[in-house]
Amino acid sequence: MKLQKAIFHTFLFILFLELIGIWILLIPDEMESASLIKASHFINSIITLFFLVLIFISLKQSDLLKYNKPEPKYYFIALVSGIGFVFFQSILNIIYYQELLFNYNFTLERLTSLSIIASIIFVPLTEELFFRNYLLRRLLEKYKPIKAIFISSLLFAFIHIPFVSLFFEFMDFSFHHAFIALFGGLIAGILFYKSKSIIPPIIFHVFWNLTSYIT
């Protein structure tokens, strides 16, 4: 896959995500509820994952659905990397904000939210299936590993730029999440390339998000 095609497919993925979220706008005001709105992210993430898998099946490209069992060491590396990355973020925050920011508050209370559960389980699954299992896999067919991993990581970072905030005054526009996602994407990409399996990147991403929410 060439760079232009990778960029185009990423834009399609973003459009796909936005279109899936439109259903909440179609619900009449009298039917809306706080619980439904809170659950919308959870519902959207399940729908997105479901349709992404359907698309992979329809493409009839067996390597996108093939399960490769990695060496046991990559499970451990992915787990440690995922948990440790949130602390590495502190260093990245210092670089980004140019000030010392260490504020850890361990709690499990947030894990009761459907939105956060979606962010820990379904979002990592969807993003890793698209950016590593599909995009990076195809980029590796065209480019050297370093270049392919970097391109996929840049595109992964791109979708974390909150462009929607440009249309709403109450939302802050920042490249912070994209900056963090770039490094997370690099680690996930290396794990995918080295292990030859999508499982380690998923484990890394799940525990990265999990640790981020409980610290």
Image (cartoon, rainbow, N blue to C red):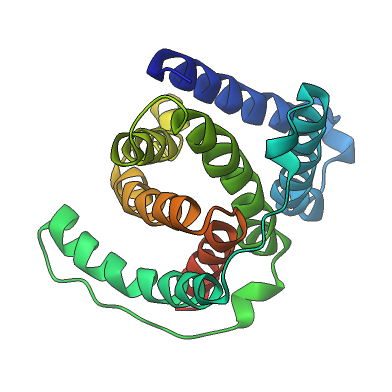
Where, by quadrant of the figure, is residue 119 drawn? bottom right
Where, by quadrant of the figure, is residue 15 drawn? top right
- Where's residue 62, x and y in %? 75, 35
Q: Residue at x 21, y 71 (%)?
A: 101
Q: Report if residue 168 is visible in the image.
A: no
Q: Is residue 181 above or below residue 144?
A: below
- Where's residue 37, x and y in %? 74, 47
Nearest the viewer among 197 and 183 is 197
Q: Report if residue 120 is visible in the image.
A: yes
- Where's residue 25, x and y in %? 75, 28
Q: Residue at x 71, y 74 (%)?
A: 112
Left or right of 141, for residue 42: right
In the rendered picture of this protein, how many numbered marks are placed on residues?
0
The furthest residue to the left: 98
Nearest the viewer among 24 and 19 is 19
Left or right of 147, for residue 17: right
- Where's residue 55, x and y in %? 77, 28
Nearest the viewer among 122 and 58 is 58
Q: Is residue 79 above or below residue 128?
A: below
The furthest residue to the right: 31
Left or right of 117, for residue 90: left
Q: Residue at x 61, y 74 (%)?
A: 110
